[in-house]
């Protein structure tokens, strides 16, 4: 029984090592947005930040909310998730949670919305 448990644990750890957050620049993030039709484009900033500006078709799921994990349960774990915040810190942490919760592919916008704006890409105001 112990051998089976160890084997299953090793397989699970191996599986987790394949899933990782892919930190990508604004151009690559935009390509992924087009490829996925923004199905799961997630802004993890606060609702107040989201109101000021955000990417078109983004859904706001506040990383600081106590219901963050419960909110992401509604998403499809088999489809890519594109996540961003202002500078990339919260989105990186959120990306790790997505992976822990079983999401297969997570793209994190390197430098966040600031990098997106610096690259002169469109935002909703």
Image (cartoon, grey):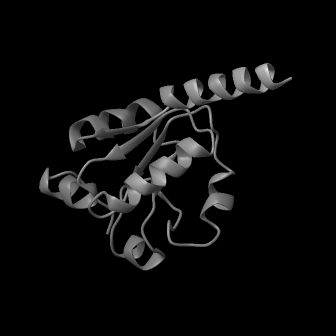
Against 69, residue 106 (above or below) is above
Depth check: 68 or 79 in front?
68
> Quick check: can you spot residue 58?
no
Asked where in the image residue 8 lies, by quadrant, the reply is top right
Task: Judge from the rendering whether residue 23 lies leftward or rightward of residue 82; answer left or right.
Answer: left
Asked where in the image residue 56 lies, by quadrant, the reply is bottom left
> Quick check: can you spot residue 61?
yes
Asked where in the image residue 26 lies, by quadrant, the reply is top left
Q: Quadrant of the N terminus?
A: top right
Q: Position of residue 5 (x, y in %)?
A: 77, 27
Please report the residue visible at 69 percent of the width from the left and 60 percent of the height from the top. Answer: 70
Against 42, residue 2 (above or below) is above
Kindly give the residue lying farthest to the bottom in the view shown. Answer: 48
Depth check: 111 or 118 in front?
111
Please report the residue visible at 64 percent of the width from the left and 46 percent of the height from the top. Answer: 75
Q: Position of residue 51 (x, y in %)?
A: 41, 75
Q: Position of residue 113 (x, y in %)?
A: 27, 59
Kindly give the residue lying farthest to the front in the view shown. Answer: 2
Please report the residue visible at 54 percent of the width from the left and 51 percent of the height from the top. Answer: 97
């Amino acid at each position: 029984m112990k051998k089976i448990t160890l084997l299953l644990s090793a397989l699970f750890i191996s599986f987790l090592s394949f899933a990782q957050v892919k930190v990508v620049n604004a151009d690559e993030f935009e390509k992924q947005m087009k490829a996925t039709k923004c199905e799961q484009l997630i802004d993890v900033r606060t609702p107040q930040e989201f109101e000021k500006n955000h990417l078109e078709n983004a859904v706001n799921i506040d990383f600081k909310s106590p219901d963050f994990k419960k909110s992401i349960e509604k998403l499809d774990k088999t489809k890519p998730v594109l996540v961003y915040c202002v500078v990339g810190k919260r989105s990186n942490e959120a990306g790790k949670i997505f992976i822990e919760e079983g999401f297969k592919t997570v793209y994190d916008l390197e430098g966040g919305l600031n990098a997106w704006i610096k690259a002169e890409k469109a935002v909703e105001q």
